[in-house]
Structures are given as structure tokens and as C-alpha cells.
Amino acid sequence: MAGARVHVDRLTKPPGSLGKLEELAEKLAGITGEIRPMFSKRSVIVMAADHGVCEEGVSAFPAEVTPQMVHNFLTGGAAVNVLARQASADVVCVDIGVNAELSHPALVQRKLRYGTGNMAKGPAMSRDEAEAAILVGVEVVDAAVSQGVRLFVTGEMGIGNTTASAAIMSSLTGVTPQQTVGRGTGVNDERLLHKIAVVERALETNHPDADDPLDVLAKVGGLEIAGLTGVILGAAARRCPVVIDGFISSVAALLAVRLKPEAAGYLIASHVSHEQGHCALLKELGLNPMLELDMRLGEGTGGVLALHLVDAACRIVTEMATFESAGVTDGKQGANDGETAR
């Protein structure tokens, strides 16, 4: 990072004038160990799973939408597919816990169970299942890295997963469900109050241990959230940057950091979601988002948009001339002359 900082300050511009792009270039150098990193192959890992808590009526959409949207990802018709094509990224869809039989040549089939249990009545899953789901994410990253992928975006699909994410955030941070529960798929005021009550009941029923992230994940989490936690840990272990999407992905990032604090250094926040709680969650992670577009779709859409900024940071350090190479006066001489005159 120090080497990148020196290089960036030698480029033909006033120091710091490219703002967050300069900070991003330095961070990418630290993650990869290369002052001029390039990411020709990048993947959006979309983890898909269902949630038993949907029985409580917490979403504006029925649970059947999860497998339907998985098919949409696989045929290239979802928003994340469109934006990924623009950003030259592959979309890898993983069935880690969809409550349906799915079959497609492009689907990564790693189903651990047919959706989680209803966390309002008991644990969402066992501790062993939560660990297994994390390892699925690690293994998906390992397979991608073996094929040349060096940059990852987190994506997800699972009706009900904002409810699980809010419960996880409340468990790990102490922030009340009134502040972590958002509208998700667009529920009305009455359904929002009900959703808050369901999260409160889930926390009271399960008593997740805030000092044990795996306990929290197992009791009030989701299989796709666990899978993304593994993606983040696996990418960090491989010295690959991870571009975090929205609220659900950021909850997975919080779990990863609580499990392994060093993982925080490998995270890039793409945007701040319109979902309530995301801004506070990013502050908890110490991340500064690059975009604010009032998005709340998930899937990895905000993360894919941020790939253009990652590319911009890489191109700046790779293609931009230095003061020396361009024969441009760097301003230091003028500053010294001014000091002498005074």
C-alpha cells in the first residue's frame, strides 16, 4: 500500500485529487500485493436459499419466487445478469438451500437442506449446517480462483432474507429490530410492524450468543448468508478483493469479520442500500461506500456497478503518466520557490 501511495502521488495530478479512487488503488495493492493489479476475470457469486420464516408473512412476495428467480439468473434475464454483462463479469449461481428441485447445466448444486427452519419458532439450522454452508462458499471461491478469477462480488437470492439479516445484525450489534428491520421487498407499514415483531420473537425464542457468530448464524441466519460469509473468508485467504453488495451481503461481511477480523481488509463497499440499517452496518464494518443510488434489489447489482470504479482505479495506476515520464512540473518546485520568497 505504501508503494502504491508513492506511485499514485507521482501521477500527473495534485495529490489526493482523485479522492476515493486513490484510496481504492492503495487498498487493491495491499490486498493483492501488486501496485498495478488487473482483474480480467471476475465473478458474482449469487447464493440462493429459502427461509422458513416466510411462514410468518414477512415478505411482499411468496417463497416460490426464490426458485423462479434462480431460473432467471441461469437464463441471463435478471438485473444482475444485465449489469454483469456490462461489467464483463460472470454470474455464478449456487443452490445452497432452495426449497425446490432445480436442474440446469450452469447451476452450482450445493444444496444442504430445503430452506431453513422458521426462526420465529426455533433455530433456523444446526451449527453443523451453518459451518457446512460457510465451507460451501470457501469451496466455490477456490474453484473460481483455480480458473483465474481474482475479484469477487457477493450476491444473493432468498425471499425472507432481509428478515434473517436484520435478526443477525441486531444479535451481533445490539441495535434494536426497530432500527435494523427494513421494508425488504416493499412491505407496507402494517407488514413492517409485523416483520419487526417476528424478528423480536425470533431473538427471544433462540437467545443467540452475540459472542459466538456461528451461534447467531445458526439460530437466526440463512444458508445463503452463511455461503456468502464463506465467499468472503475464502477470497480473503486467497488475497482476492471482495466487493460487497447491499444489506444482506454486508451482514455476511459482519459475520466474516467477527469470525476473522483480518477479513475486514479485503472488503470493498460498493454502495449504501436504501434498506434501513445498511448505513449503520457499513459504519460498524468501517467501510465507506462508493455509490449511493437508493438501490435495494440485492442479487449483487450494486456490487457489479462498483466494478467500473475498481477498473477505473486500476487503469489510473497502470495507464496514467507520472510527472517524470510526461515531463510535467510537479508543483513541488513552485511550492519551494514560494517558501523562499516569503
Image (spheres, rainbow, N blue to C red):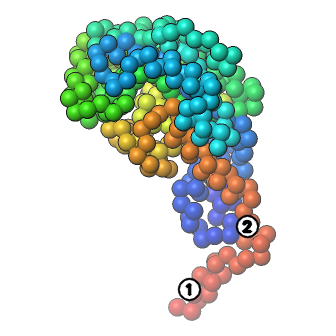
- In the depicted structure, whether residue 101 falls above or below residue 317: above
Label 1 sits on what residue type?
Glu
In the rendered structure, find residue 71 and report the number of the disc placed on it: none
**Residue at the image point whose x is 62% and y is 11% from the top:** 103
Q: Which residue position is annotated with label 2? A: 322
Q: Is residue 50 visible?
A: yes
Q: Residue at x 45, y 35 (%)?
A: 297
Name the one closer to the observer, 281 or 188: 188
Residue 276, image x, y percentages: 32, 38
Image spot of residue 311 (x, y percent): 66, 49
Q: What is the tally of numbered marks visible in this picture?
A: 2
- x%, y% of residue 174? 28, 30
Which element is circle 2 on? loop
Residue matched to label 1: 339
Judged left or right of residue 23, residue 202 is left
Disc 1 is placed on an element classified as helix
The amino acid type, in three-letter code, at marker 2 is Thr
Say few, some or many: other residues with alpha carbon within 10 Å of mark 1 (under 14 / 14 to 19 / 20 or more): few
